[in-house]
Image: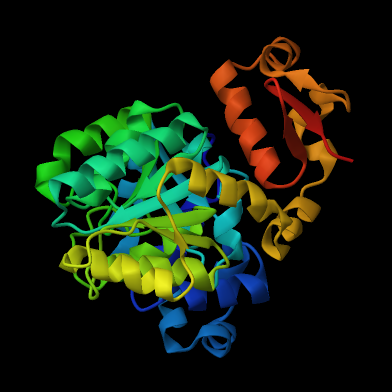
Amino acid sequence: MTQDPGLASWLQLTLTPGLGAAAIRGLLQQFGLPEKVLGATRAQLERAAGPAAAQLLRPEGIAPAIERSLRWAEEPGHAIITLADAEYPRLLLEIQDPPPLLYAIGQPALLQRPALAVVGSRNATTQGARNAEQFARAFSDAGLTIVSGLALGIDAAAHRGGLAGAGSTIAVLGTGVDQVYPRQNAALAQHIAEAGLLLSEFPLGTPGAAHHFPRRNRLISGLAQGCLVVEAALASGSLITARAAAEQGREVFALPGSIHSPLSKGCHALIKQGAKLVESADDVLAELTAFRRSGYASTRAASAAPEDEPLLVQMGFDPVDVDTLCARSGLAAKQVAAELLRLELAGQVAALPGGMYQRLA
């Protein structure tokens, strides 16, 4: 992607010590783009965001970090995505605390595609990891991008399944995007950087810290239209992701297990609280298709004007198959399938018998 010429100003905002995401959004709401924020007086900044905002007038201490980030963003496959960029994921704009800036390595286009979060225990059983990988591959082949957190166990298995299918995977990190944690997943992270997307809101060089991972979990759920939990103890961080998903209006799914297994108790608790019980990938796909009838999906559909969807223009209003759409649009079958699923979830396209699709009025 083409970098924002004002990227240095965004970096100055986000790298200023003591200036959190909420304060930055407040400054942006009051003054506009970062260049306007940086042109404000000390008194104006302090009134808008407190004493820490005055540090913006003394950027010398963070100048090396800004320069390093700018050089990093110029490297192939690297991107820094700001709230003002078209590439910024639309679903994150709907959560309570969207990050002002995202660091990415890989394929940023995945941020605009329909996604499902798949999370679970770091201490997964062999069967649990196998389930996560098989389910994730089925979802990926259906056109969904798999979002998870690059942890050991269920997360890693979900990423492998996503990479094996057509929809690929996004790993949301609790470190800087240039760091790999845990180190055991270094090879997997490299594969994701090449065929999927590594994503983080934390500045380059940020090491892993316990309080980073619960914060990262809101992005895992926020990027997806639903969240599937596979094996989780009652104190699992995966339940934080599931709660964030529910608060964000996403669908929550859980895989049941043995009543004797501690790693099933978190999933069973979610099911008791209203999560959808999942026995097959079709259970999730059917719910997500029905999700277009919810108020959340209706809001998203209404916000997307038909003229903004090129594939809808290519479809017309008569039933059409994927091959015809490929010929009309010039897109590969995998891209067309992913777009059709996204439009179906948004309530703008209906799947018909015989592999046909029709635009809905």
The image position of residue 350, as x and y in percent, is 75, 36
Compared to residue 113, the image places residue 264 above or below, namely: below
As drawn, the residue found furthest toward the left would be 184
Q: Residue at x 50, y 48 (%)?
A: 284
Q: Foreground residue, 163 or 251?
A: 251
Q: Quadrant of residue 348?
A: top right
Where does the C terminus fall, quadrant-wise?
top right
Q: Foreground residue, 348 or 218?
A: 348
The answer to whether any part of residue 58 appears in the image is no
The image position of residue 332, as x and y in percent, is 58, 16
Q: Quadrant of residue 161?
A: top left
As drawn, the residue found furthest toward the front would be 259
Q: Residue at x 29, y 45 (%)?
A: 132
The answer to whether any part of residue 193 appears in the image is yes
Q: Foreground residue, 88 or 231?
A: 231
Compared to residue 266, the image places residue 309 above or below, namely: above
Q: Residue at x 78, y 19 (%)?
A: 320
